[in-house]
Amino acid sequence: MNYTDRIKFVPTEMKKEKPLTDQLEFGKTFTDHMFMMDYDQEKGWHDPKIVPYQPLIIDPAAMVYHYGQTVFEGLKAYLTEDNRVLLFRPEKNMTRMNSSNERLCIPPIDEELVLQALKKLIAIDRDWIPASEGTSLYIRPFVIATEPYLGVAPSKKYKFMIILSPVGSYYKEGIHPVKILVENEYVRAVSGGTGTVKTAGNYAASLKAQELATSKGYSQVLWLDGLHRKYIEEVGSMNIFFKIKGEVITPALNGSILEGVTRNSILMLLNHWGVPVTERKLSIDEVYQAAIDGELEEAFGTGTAAVISPVGALFMNEQEILINNGRTGELSKKLYDTLTGIQLGTQPDPFNWMVEVQS
Amino acid sequence: MNYTDRIKFVPTEMKKEKPLTDQLEFGKTFTDHMFMMDYDQEKGWHDPKIVPYQPLIIDPAAMVYHYGQTVFEGLKAYLTEDNRVLLFRPEKNMTRMNSSNERLCIPPIDEELVLQALKKLIAIDRDWIPASEGTSLYIRPFVIATEPYLGVAPSKKYKFMIILSPVGSYYKEGIHPVKILVENEYVRAVSGGTGTVKTAGNYAASLKAQELATSKGYSQVLWLDGLHRKYIEEVGSMNIFFKIKGEVITPALNGSILEGVTRNSILMLLNHWGVPVTERKLSIDEVYQAAIDGELEEAFGTGTAAVISPVGALFMNEQEILINNGRTGELSKKLYDTLTGIQLGTQPDPFNWMVEVQS
Ligand SMILES: Cc1ncc(COP(=O)(O)O)c(C=O)c1O
Ligand SMILES: Cc1ncc(COP(=O)(O)O)c(C=O)c1O
């Protein structure tokens, strides 16, 4: 179905100045336009339009401000050397958005419409996609509940939007390992809660632990399960992998971990390469023991922002363990190079992941 | 310290029509004015003002929309027969708001300033306080993160606001028992999470279970603990009490239950009356066993909205138990009458709970 022509377009009358590519920061600059669409009970999702980037005008009683009924997604568009614009597995984000919507009692959104809207918006703001290595255009679709009502119940009105932000290289001086703190006081999510979906409250709940970790010099926290405080879940906004005695292990999806698109892609790549890889319960003790026994070879996080983030050290119970002497492991590097190569169109794309945006 | 004179006041130019008292619904109508105050890193909380009730103009990248960094409170003002305006223990809400802020990495707010702002706002919109029995003015202070930034980190900018909503009698035909479903799939909160504070994400997470309960004919869900799915926590927006063999029992504050102001007040009243009352772990099995043994005498929820809400039936594992034959218990009734009497100034206020708003 072709929705593109049904999406109204109101061009901006005043184009903003674009930031210098080497001064880009994650999520601080936004492009000239945004996509928006409204929902109410009579009309369903209606009035899709691309308009100048502008503030929202919303009643202070809108439910998003009080009960956090909201869902978001995050993906990227890349500019290739031959000047094509590629999206990385965008349909995965659309599907995940709708499973988040289901959990949050938000009406489902036509995935094909959103994908076409996304492409149209990117084509319009194409000049904003930065060109130098490691940069990209971060895409943030999100839904918020806008009914002005203080009762705790699903909202009867919503706004769906897409905003775009040109982002710099995650690694300013090339890929380098991060130090991570194992969190044993705060909990991110628990089975039966909202950990498997991308909704605002999960991130609000994580701020305190993140703040404490930062103050101790660690860049992220590693979450343990809320039940036993023992099994590894994930990192701030990444899934996590460990390589122990030649085998790559990542925590199995257990009802409280977010299923990352990058995680899924890494699993596919490793299988494709014939590297032994397992999704299973993995305790922090097992990882520490492997480190003591000299069998912990690598650890890395996976996510849209950093792609692959090698973990150089873990800190728990006043004890820090170094991983691969604090250096980027061979497999982490190979995965990073392959994935970014596929995303930038410089490497073959064996699974047909990339989707081109026509201008 | 007198802040009142420092709060700027911009009166509305167009007073809204007030709803008829018998048509008031909870949280749908708002008064003519609202209080607002901004935070940034240079000025701290600044520019407190009372302005006409109006939509907020906020960047779509504001952190509240994406990462749910927000806190709220809920309390009420009552109009007495001799035309005084009384607040119920407002300082408890101010303290709780700041502990919520602490957990959510939101800068603390001067409690005395907020209390004075609240009184000034209520005095201005005093005509909105409905007069007939059971009605009141619901007060919603809240904080939202407004920095336009997609990084997961505490916001550097916030808005604090107070909005007011005249609310009707919770019980249209007098106090009557509700039927409650014991939730055993979804979890509201877990120790280490945000269950002890009033933040948006907790309520977003609860919508799904609430929706399912409503579709089965139950008005609320009873949450069990996220660890064992066994111990009773609380109801949608109420704490819960059971009377078993003459003893009143409520779940002890365990790191995942919200400490209700009403809960605390009920504990004080029961102690004052010499009724045996215990805060401890209480399993759902114990309650069911007490029901089977004929020892479960009453159950009731406590919260600002309903004050006391008698529980007439509990449903779990396809089995419904009736409590006190589905009728309001004697103690529930006495607590309801006493508390509403204190709030309306028709009964003595032994603990000096009520705070008058001077006009
Ligand atoms: C909590 C959490 N885990 C994992 C991820 C990684 O997911 P993806 O690979 O889809 O970016 C993200 C980021 O999106 C996240 O927010
Ligand atoms: C989750 C939750 N529990 C309990 C309560 C009862 O608290 P209070 O008595 O302060 O209204 C509320 C309502 O405020 C609530 O939202």
Image: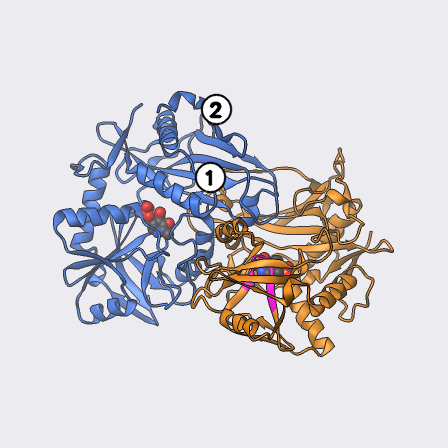
Chain colours: A orange, B blue
Mark before the other along the chain sequence, 1 or 2: 2
* Badge 2 density bin: few <14, some 14–19, many ≥20, Cα 10 Å: few
Chain to which the residue tagged by mark 1 belongs: B
Q: Which residue is mark 1?
A: B107
Rendering coords of residue A319 (x, y %): 50, 62
* Badge 1 density bin: few <14, some 14–19, many ≥20, Cα 10 Å: some
Is residue B192 toward the left or the right of residue A240 in the image? left
- Name, please, the residue furthest toward the left: B274
What is the secondary structure assignment of the residue under circle 2? loop
What is the secondary structure assignment of the residue under circle 1? loop
The answer to whether B327 is drawn above or below residue B289 in the figure is above
Q: Quadrant of ligand 1?
A: bottom right
Rendering coords of residue A296 (x, y %): 60, 72
The quadrant where residue B120 appears: top left
Secondary structure mostly taken by the magenta-highlighted segment of the chain: strand
Q: Which residue is mark 2?
A: B14
Q: Amino acid at mark 1?
A: Pro
Residue shown at the point (49%, 71%) measured from the top left: A285
The answer to whether B12 is drawn above or below residue B106 in the figure is above
In this view of the protein, which residue sits in the foreground, B358 or B62? B62
The answer to if B24 sits in the magenta stretch is no
Is residue A1 toward the left or the right of residue B173 in the image? right
User: How many badges with numbers are in the image?
Assistant: 2
Is residue B91 toward the left or the right of residue A257 in the image? left
Please provide the residue range marked out in magenta.
A234-241
Dots 1, 2 in contact, CB < 8 A = no
Rendering coords of residue A171 (x, y %): 70, 53
Q: Is residue B117 visible?
A: yes
Rendering coords of residue B210 (x, y %): 41, 58
